[in-house]
Image (spheres, helix red, strand yellow):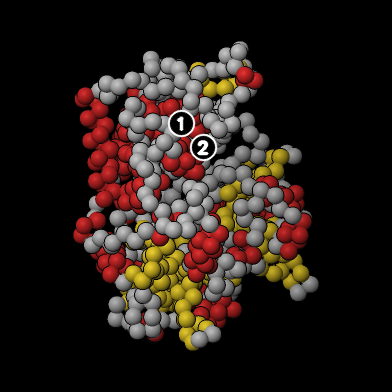
Amino acid sequence: MKRFAELLDRLVLTPQRNAKLRLMRDYLADTPDPDRGYALAALTGDLVVNSVKPGTLRALIGERLDEVLFYYSYDYVGDLAETIALAWPEPGTADVAPPLAAPLPRPAGAGKSRGYPKDRERARLKDVATTLSLPFDDLPEMPSHRRSTKSPPRPAEETEGEGARAREGRRTASSSEEETGPPASAPPTYPRPPKENDAAHSPDPSDPFGWALASENTATPSHAHGWRQTPGIGHNAPPLTLSDVVETLQRTSKLEAPRVLAGWLDQLDSTGRWGLVKLVGGALRVGVSARLAKQALADLGGKEVNEIEEVWHGVTPPYRPLFAWIEGRAERPESRIRAPFRPVMLSHAIADGEVAAITPEAYAAEWKWDGIRVQAVVEGLAKRLYSRTGEDISSGFPDLVHSLDFQGAIDGELLVGGHTMEGFRLGSFGDLQQRLNRKVVTEDVARRFPAFIRAYDVLVAGGEDLRRLPFRERRARLERLVAGSRSQRLDLSPLVPFADADDLARLRAEPPAAVVEGLMLKRWDSVYEPGRPKGPWFKWKRDPHVVDAVLMYAQRGHGKRSSYYSDYTFGVWTDGETGPELVPVGKAYFGFTDEELTEIDRFVRNNTVARFGPVREVVHQPDAGLVFEVAFEGLNRSTRHRSGVAMRFPRIARLRWDKPPAEADRLETLEALLRG
């Protein structure tokens, strides 16, 4: 576990791609099974620990640290793992259950239960959520005295690098522990297994986790086999391994998990605690994509990364057969899944200088549809629908999957629409969102938002792998496949004829429908190659929509941005009951440079008019405020936002220091755009 935490720490501090690859490759080469397999799963995002949620971690630190002190620390550091790693008391320095210090004074009328203020205060917080156009649950649960405490704003120059200083503090603490050893205090004590004469073998209701029971050893209850020893916990326990953590939590219930985690956190140093919380929290955020981690594995065995992609969805953590093949100890693992997923081919955004080279003799043009990319696979009686990353989403689209009547694998866009008396109707992306992220879909939703696939490539047909064929031949095979299908949920993405680059530019600027977001350009001779090869496929999206909006609220960022107010809610003008008023239409946290971030942060601190936990309301009057030029891809109707609209992929395109807020855009502009 310590080695894994050190790997994460070094990856965070290493910006160079090749250096990250070298760190991961060396770790995979030097670490035995199954630890390296679980580490690889964590780096690729394929490791899930269902027994631990962020609320579990917050509850644990809340039992050891005053809640106000924790929230101030979390607000300062900006990362939950960093905060817990630094604030967790060393064994022997504090009792387990009581806080480190007496709670700070609560204002009169504040709620007495931690995290659950009185109705009046929750109603006030709900009003804030409504103003921010967010669900109530999106605002963090904080004790009422935390929300009402007024801390003086710190100048920007005094807050730069706080997250970095926190990491440095964690590393310093770890190195100090290694040099001096653990404190010379009594070893921590943990719950003991129940004995035969224990009354009813049940814990005290007031002490559900058994903190009052003490023994040198800690055991975890097993419903099937009595009590078992928890790895890594106890006075003479061996060092905790990554496989100890994963396998123990996989068989541990949500009720037992907090006690097990607490024992591990007591045993580890600050870097180990940081790595443990990162692992079980499910979001490493160390600057490594799944593709980069797979590339490191490929480098370890001298393989092509596409070979790794081909077998990836047929293996599961800790990937013993995969490592055996990589190291030449076994044959390549073959997927036993019927109707398996094949890794997709991706495109590059075309550069201005590359457009002139696009000719109809070399490239085919298609519309780029505003849906989600899917892969539909039928093999015998097995039918599956996959997302672009290989997630099986068949259960969310049973109507579509049932209608598939071909044999093979097609690549296409999932859209909403269908055949009507007037012809074929295409729905918007907002309509499609009614079908997304549903484990179970009702008949009513399926009827009102029928899903279909607009196919644009074929990978397998009639049991034959077509991916090595040129696109021209694959396209002909796809046309025959779609023509032979009787399904009303499958159609063909049409080719777009063009004469030259100027013709393409005109087509891009004047798409035939709102659900078209640009053009796809594919070389006629391109094979279907997983990953993102440079040259064969380009995407040429429409220019984004742009409006001027006024900054209304700002919230601190996370990680390296924890010292800055970097998440911005902005609005446009509309007519209210008492005159013009701003209504929020979106939230963005990128698009600006580091220098611009410093300027915005300074404006937020100097122009704050109210505070709501980590959120600051800034001045936004017709004659005072900050205007953003906001770029976005599209609009949807929204019942969550007071404005009734929601932006898709908004980002800050420009800071308009020169423009008074009164001249920002109005809601009517967005309404007209939404109507098309």
| Residue at the bottom extreme of this rendering | 579
Answer yes or no: do the residues labelled 1 and 2 have beta carbons within 8 Å? yes
Farthest residue, direction front: 108
**Residue under the point 42% across and 28% down:** 264
Q: Where is residue 174 in the image (x, y as percent from the top left)?
A: 26, 32
Examine the rendered structure and indicate whether residue 37 appears above or below residue 87. Answer: above
For the residue pair 283 and 430, the one nearer the viewer reads as 283
Within-10-Å neighbours for mark 2: few <14, some 14–19, many 20+:
many
Q: Is mark 1 on a helix, strand or loop?
A: helix
Whether residue 656 is visible, yes or no, is: yes
Which residue is depicted at the point 38% across and 23% down? 188
Q: In this view, does 264 lie above or below 639?
A: above
Q: Mark 2 points at which residue?
A: 52
At label 2, the amino acid type is Val
Where is residue 295? Give x, y as percent. 39, 38
Residue 631 in picture, x, y percent from top left? 42, 71
Q: What residue type is labelled 1?
A: Leu
Is the residue 620 above or below the residue 192 in the image?
below
Mark 1 Cα within 10 Å, few/some/many (few <14, many 20+)?
Answer: many
Q: Where is residue 507 in the image (x, y as percent from the top left)?
A: 51, 74
| Quadrant of the image occupied by residue 636 | bottom right
Which quarter shows the C terminus? bottom right
**Can residue 296 be seen from the camera position used here?**
no
Give the numbered dot on residue 90.
none
Name the quadrant containing residue 290: top left
Q: Name the residue under label 1.
A: 261
Looking at the image, is mark 1 or mark 2 earlier in the sequence?
A: 2
**Is residue 26 found left or right of 520 in the rendered image?**
left
